[in-house]
Amino acid sequence: MKLSGLGGRLYRGETSINIIAARKKWYALSGVFIVLSLFSLGVQGLHLGIEFKGGSSFTVTTTSGTIEQARETVGSAGYQGNTIIQTIGNDKIRIQTGVIDTAQSNAIQDALAAEFGITVESIDTQNVGPSWGEEISKKALQGLIAFLICIMIYLALTFEPKMAVAAIVAVIHDVFITVGIYALVGFEVTPSTVIGFLTILGYSLYDTVVVFDKVRENTRAITSTGKTTYAEAANLAVNQTIVRSLNTSLIALLPVAAILFVGAGLLGAGTLKDLSLALFIGLIAGTYSSIFIASPILAALREREPAIKAHNQRVMARRGGAGLNNVPNSETKKQRK
């Protein structure tokens, strides 16, 4: 297949990628990632930040200190619970503990200041109670549910209910895979991560709406024309928008990849990796689902309608049985028999 002028040939229907007919392959590929996500969530789980589970954080500015040194210092201050210690850039060490009282927090600050030769005031300390963390988690979940409900209502009113269902399935697909890979990598879930999740929801829906708008245009009078099946018309719409979707996603991925691999990876800007990883995975999953998941699901739902079934049968009858491979539904199998 020549890449030169491919977008134009796909739009005119001169070249076609049979995405709708091969939907079982896309479902299987998504199934692999969903199983991987389930495994990572079940075995490793999400590493929630103190904003969600409560706890204390101490950020020390030092160019010579080590993680092991910080761990021993916190232990010598009397804290024996679970401790997460990581470097931020080249001159900061962050120590996270569970929920502690004021006296314990002051003891840890004093010990860190003495060990690293700094003042207590220079230590960036954050204390979050368990009730506050629980409230933040609840609000994040409520925000996600409200977002999905509003989007489903909007899509049902703007397009049709089946398009809304297909779009929401694709969005849930994106979020689940993103969360699973996030757990597999082991990055900490922070408010920035939640912002990243909400951002990819919006992007995924934008991409899906672009595809569905073209599907609606191609199938608006499909039962009266009698020239193509619903699956063929939907497949043409996907082909007509696929180049645009890929180009838009590539342009969006470039700055996100720069933040993730250059900013967080090479430069050590740890505060950026929470947001950038969620965006990077989510953008890829969102582009994939809008093309290979949402549209095939929509076609499968519409082909169950009696009017569309009858239309597909008429089209096949006019063709004399030719082109049955382009109608990936149960009616095709019956006609082959």
Image (cartoon, rainbow, N blue to C red):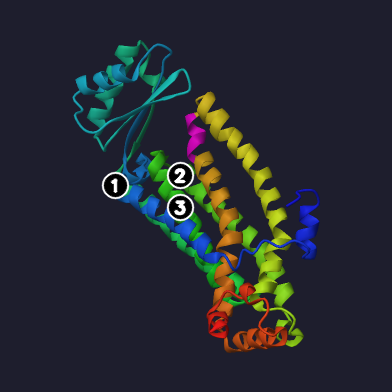
Residue of label 3 = 177
Relative placement, left or right, of 150 versus 118 is right
Name the main secondary structure of what is drawn in magenta.
helix
Residue 152 in view, yes or no = no
Classify mark 3: helix, strand or loop. helix
Q: Pinpoint residue 200: horizontal percent, then vertical percent.
A: 55, 52
When the figure is inspected, residue 199 is found, relative to residue 87, above or below; the finding is: below
On the image, which quarter does residue 122 sit in?
top left
Point out which mark residue 43 bears: 1
Mark found first going from the N terminus, 2 or 3: 3
Mark 2 crowdedness (10 Å alpha carbons): few <14, some 14-19, many ≥20: some
| Residue in view at x 73 percent, y 73 percent | 218
Residue 11 in view, yes or no = yes
Q: Pinpoint residue 293: horizontal percent, then vertical percent.
A: 55, 63
Q: Which amino acid does label 2 sit on?
A: Pro
Residue of label 2 = 191
Q: Which amino acid does label 1 sit on?
A: Val
* Residue 159: in magenta span: no
Classify mark 2: helix, strand or loop. helix
User: What segment carries the magenta color?
Assistant: 270-274
Relative placement, left or right, of 120 versus 282 is left
| Residue in view at x 80 percent, y 57 percent | 8
Relative placement, left or right, of 134 versus 268 is left
Classify mark 1: helix, strand or loop. helix
When the figure is inspected, residue 286 is found, relative to residue 297, above or below; the finding is: above
As measured in the structure, the alpha-carbon distance from the residue carrying label 2 to the one carrying label 3 is 19 Å
Contact? badges 1 and 3 (CB < 8 Å): no
| Residue in view at x 55 percent, y 65 percent | 23
Q: Which amino acid does label 3 sit on?
A: Ile
